[in-house]
Amino acid sequence: MKRFLKASYLTLVYLFLYVPVLILIIFSFNNSRYSTVWKGFSLQWYSHLFNNSLLMEAFVHSITVALISSVLSCVLGTLAAVVFYWYRFIGRKVLHTLIFCVMMSPDIVMGISLLSFFILIGMQPGFLTLLLAHITFSFPFVVTIVFARLQGFDHSIIDAARDLGAGELRIFTHVIFPLILPAVMAGWLVSFTLSLDDVIVSFFVTGPNYDILPLKIYSMVRLGVKPEVNALSTLLFTFTLVSVFCSHLLVKEKRK
């Protein structure tokens, strides 16, 4: 009985999570312009999607910002995590605590504060302000993930490398970095996902001449969900599934 209740509970949870996505995927192939009426199978909305220059431009902008911000966040966050773990200096605990404060801050507070800061220093909203904002809210997640990994391995390995005459740079490149590489990749994936998905912070810091996909979709669905949005969401979901599947294959091969 207890096993049946557990299975029923998990089934309900997964149905609640994935049935809406499944409905979205089904109606992306709907021949009707209205999402709630099924009128046969069609691929026309995918064709319309790729012919929609404004939507494709917003998609390219989103991918560009997500790739650049995730790479920079990953580099800066990894170095910061190593500094917090390796060195002891005045204010270290305070700075480390402030990292968590940024993570816990509401998105609307961060968006307004970044907008005020950019206006104060005279920066015009656009690509650069959007990129800096995405690095700002992604950076703490990378620090936390990599720092947790650093705390998990044996510190005597570093001591052994020092006894063998390795300098700090060599220790980092040949000892520490290979050990934290899975955490670095996880931090990159989290940063990429956060950047690609963000709406609230991006709404405040981007300019009218640099539209991104989440804001474009938000502006489109305010008057109703269009079939092109269903098609785009299906492609993004498929890309996510393929990425997760490939990452599991890589991890499996590495373990073997």
Image: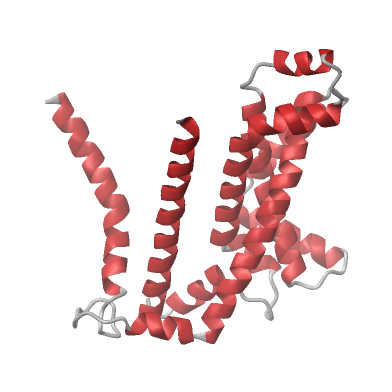
Measuring 69% from the left and 57% from the top, which residue is drawn there? 69
Measuring 59% from the left and 79% from the top, which residue is drawn there? 57
Viewer-closest of 96 and 227: 227
Spot the residue most to the left. 1
User: Seen in the image, is 216 located left or right of residue 11?
Assistant: right
Viewer-closest of 13 and 82: 82
The answer to whether residue 78 is above or below residue 203 is above
Q: Position of residue 61 (x, y in %)?
A: 63, 72
Q: Is residue 90 visible?
A: yes
User: Seen in the image, is 5 located left or right of residue 28?
Assistant: left
Viewer-closest of 173 and 200: 173
Measuring 33% from the left and 85% from the top, which residue is drawn there? 44
Q: Quadrant of the C terminus?
A: top left
Viewer-closest of 196 and 124: 196
Q: Position of residue 188 (x, y in %)?
A: 62, 48
Q: Quadrant of residue 181?
A: top right
Q: How many marks?
A: 0
The answer to whether residue 76 is above or below residue 210 is above
Q: Position of residue 185 (x, y in %)?
A: 60, 43
Q: Is residue 212 visible?
A: no
The answer to whether residue 213 is above or below residue 70 is below
Q: Position of residue 104 (x, y in %)?
A: 62, 42
User: Seen in the image, is 204 located left or right of residue 20?
Assistant: right
Q: Quadrant of the N terminus?
A: top left
Q: Quadrant of residue 102?
A: top right
Q: Quadrant of residue 46?
A: bottom left
Measuring 75% from the left and 65% from the top, which residue is drawn there? 129
